[in-house]
Amino acid sequence: MSIESKQRRGRPKRYTPTARQVAKAAGQLRYFDSIPCARGHISERYTSNAGCIACHLEKRGHPFTGSRVNPGLLKVIRLAENSEARQLENLKQKIICLQNNAKKKYAELRMALTQTQEI
């Protein structure tokens, strides 16, 4: 696959090559794309198979000291998002209750006003 833009019905198609394709075209053995692997490592990858170098080192028994997505941090972020959603839902329910109460109060005041006008 070439990196140049591809022709489609006479017009060039906009094409953005991936980091791996650019590295392969340049003849590099490794590349970095800042996307975590399945195990959460944020490290360089091999251009030949797109495998994570940190995973490869861990499989061979070498301790990996690079950056890794912290699962505890991800859990805290998810909990915060869920709690924000719950807070928003609670606020919506409170607004609905206040609107209903306001309608009831308005109806009561209107009834009281009509009763005093009748007397």
Image (cartoon, grey):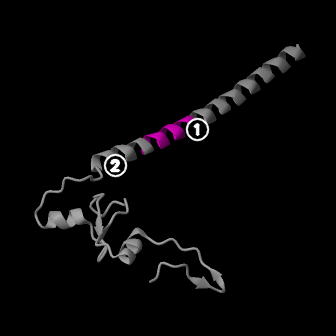
Q: Residue at x 34, y 63 (%)?
A: 32
Span colored in magenta: 82-92
Count of picture labels: 2
Looking at this view, is 107 or 115 the one in front? 107
Q: Residue at x 37, y 59 (%)?
A: 34
Of marks 2 and 1, which one's residue comes earlier in the chain? 2
Q: Which mark is residue 74?
A: 2
Q: Tell me residue 116's x, y (percent).
A: 84, 14
Instruction: Calculate the distance from the C-alpha at mark 2 to the C-alpha at mark 1.
Output: 27 Å
Q: Main secondary structure of the magenta part?
A: helix
Q: Residue at x 66, y 28 (%)?
A: 101
Residue highlighted by disc 1: 92
Q: Is residue 65 left or right of residue 80?
A: left
Looking at this view, is 3 or 55 the one in front? 3
The amino acid type, in three-letter code, at marker 2 is Leu
Judging from the image, what secondary structure is the residue with disc 2 in?
helix
Tell me the quarter of the picture where residue 42 sits. bottom left
In the image as oriented, which residue stretches furthest toward the bottom? 9
**Dot in front, 2 or 1:** 2
Tell me the quarter of the picture where residue 94 sits. top right
- How packed mark 1 is, by other alpha carbons closer than 10 Å (few <14, some 14-19, many 20 or more), is few
